Structures are given as structure tokens and as C-alpha cells.
Amino acid sequence: MTDNYKQNLARYSSDVVKKGLQLTQKITLSKSEKKFEDCTKILTKSSNHEHLFKLGVEQYILGNISDAIDSFTKALEFNDRFCEAYFLRGFAHSFLGNNIDSKNDLYLGLKHKQFYQDSVIAFYSKIIIISELQASSFILSCYNDLLQIKTDINKCYNPIELSIQGAINRLLGNTQDALEKINEALKLNSNFVSSYILRAEIHNLLGDFDAAIEDCFTSLRLNPMHINKDNTLYILGSSFLSLEKYQSAIDYLDQSLALNGNLFNGFYNRGLAYYKMGQIKKAIKDFSDALIVKPTFVWAYINRGVAYYDLGCHQKSLDDYNQALVIDSKCKAAYVNRSIVFRELGNHEKALEDLQKAQTIID
């Protein structure tokens, strides 16, 4: 437990005690000292779980996931039927990759909540649980139902519900709706680190790279050690790549890959940056590393084929285009690029054949 967490907990506990004492002073049914003390204990206990839950929400929003789990756990010690605490602790466990603990908490949350329809986090928890058991069409219907639920502005976790709806809209391709939900979440809580990261992804998708970079920097300023830091640095690198600031792209992708060596898109984008800077061998190395992580990544084969061609390695270039077509027989770029290699090798018949095939493919 961090010192900062202890200080926050002490502050909340102090507020709870004061509130409990103020309320008990209004009780006139009994003037006995013993009953007065009992009432104070009951009221303090009753409100403690709510304040611990709110503290957990603050930690969750800031991205301090372990501290959030600690707070939700303490809240549940006071009230073991506190369904919202189970739900958010379940989400927090999932952030850390503790999938069994996550599912257990989501089950417990639903067990203690009779009507899940009135809560976004409860409905989303149900979707997570059934997602492994049902057809994708059913899940799609559930997602659409979730987007219709109205959030309660009085809930302290309202920004989290709005962020969930934003994430679902993003998943369904409703980009503008996703952006609106995330903007609403950040209006309610401007410290919501994950929402800045999600909004950065959306800005990047929409081609607003400067806005994506700004959101990434804001998330890193709010919490430099956020659990999604690798993804934040990846978005930064990708945005700088799109802005043709190749060295900055490489610098941030270096940092992202140092945190997570399984980001195949990180290797791929860094390879593109190296290629644009004329560092062909480094580009080939990154495209190859991307293929180690994801052997079916067609565009890594395409671009490595281009890089090999630039080095005069025509057979290796052909091999990559051939492999791309094994994975995707309708890859237009592979046919066009392979035709260039065939023409370079003097095989005009095969070059023409590939161009004709490319012309039949609709982009």
C-alpha cells in the first residue's frame, strides 16, 4: 500500500467518522452512552464501504489498478453484497490479466444484483461472462442493448459506464458515437487515464494525429506508470509515423516494444519508419519480427518484399509475395508487386498474368 493511498484512506476515514458523529447527535430515541457509541459504529460501518468504493473508483480511473483492487476488497469486507464493488474489482483483475479472479467477481456481482438491466457495468459483466458461450450474433445484440442503457449521473462510477459505452461503440465501428461517449466521460472526470488512451485511438483512426498525440501525453502526465503505457506509446509512435516524423515515431515505438515485445504492429510500424528513413536492413528486421509474433500478417510480407526488392534480393522478394498470396489470394498489392519483380527478371508473361489478376480484384 503506497503512502499516498494511506493518506487518502486516512482522509476518507476521518470524513466518515465526522459524518457518523454528526448524524448520531440527531438521534434522540436514547441518551445512553452505550447506544450512542453503538449508533456511531453502525453509521461509520455503513458509510465506510461507500467511501472505500469511491476511493477505489478514483484509483481505477487514475489507472492505479492494484490500489483500486485493495479498496474494493476493503469495501467488500464491510458489505459482502456490494455488487458494484464486485463488478469493478472484476474489471480491475482483468486489467492485470487475472481472468479467473475477474470472472469470479463478475459472477458474484450478478448474483447480488437482481436486475442487471439498470446498470451498464452489470450488463457489460453479463456480456463478458456469456461471450465464451454464445454466438457472435447474440453478443452483437447484447452490445446494442447495452448502448441503450442510460447512465445515472449520481453514480460515482458514471465515467466508467460512459467509457464502456464508448469502447463498445468503437468496437462496433460507431466511431463518432464512441468519441461522444468518451468526451462525456472526460467532462465528468478529467483524470480518467483510460478514456484519454481510448480517445487517442479514435483520433488516430479518424486521422486527427495531433489530437491523438495530445491525449497520449495527457494520459502519461496523469499516470506515467499506467498499465496501458505500452499501448499509449504505440499510439504516439504510430501518430508520429503518420505525420512523417519518423525519428519520433521510432523513439516512441522503441519504448513501447521495450514494455511489450508482442506488439506486432509496433514492429511493423517501426519497420515502416526505418524504411522511410532509408534504413532498409533495419526495416527488414522489424518486418521479420512482426511475422514472428503474427505469421499471418500479410502486410509485413508485402513490405518486406518491397525492402528485399530494393536490396536486389529478387527471389526473397518473390517468396514474400507468394506467401502473402497463400494467406490472402485476393491481395491486390501482392499481385502488382510480384509482377514488377517478374518483369525485372525478364518473365514478361508471368508479369502480365499478375497484372491481369490484380485488375479483377476490387479494392
Image (tube, rainbow, N blue to C red):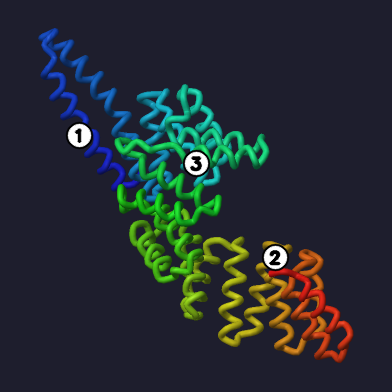
Q: CA distance from mark 1 to mark 3?
A: 29 Å
Image quarter of the N terminus: top left
Nearest to N terminus: mark 1 or mark 3: 1
Q: What kind of residue is marked 1?
A: Ser
Q: Nearer the viewer, residue 350 or 42?
A: 350
Find residue 14 and name its label.
1
In the image: residue 149, left or right of residue 283: left
User: Which residue is rendered at x = 40% and y = 28% of the image?
Assistant: 76
Mark 3 / mark 2, whichever is N-terminal: 3
Residue bearing mark 2: 297
Of the numbered discs 1 and 2, the one sitting upstream in the chain is 1
Residue 301: mark: none
Q: Secondary structure at mark 2?
A: loop
Residue at the (51%, 35%) spot, across then down: 125
Q: For residue 54, what is the image quadrant?
A: top left
Task: Kindly identify the amino acid type of the residue bearing the numbered disc 3.
Answer: His
Q: Are marks 1 and 3 in contact (CB under 8 Å)?
A: no
| Residue density around tag 3, few if under 14, some if 14–19, many if 20 or more, within 10 Å | many
Which residue is tagged 3? 93
Q: Is residue 85 above or below residue 173?
A: above
Q: Position of residue 266 (x, y in %)?
A: 57, 67
**Residue at 51%, 53% in the rendered image:** 174
Q: What secondary structure is found at the residue carrying circle 3?
A: helix
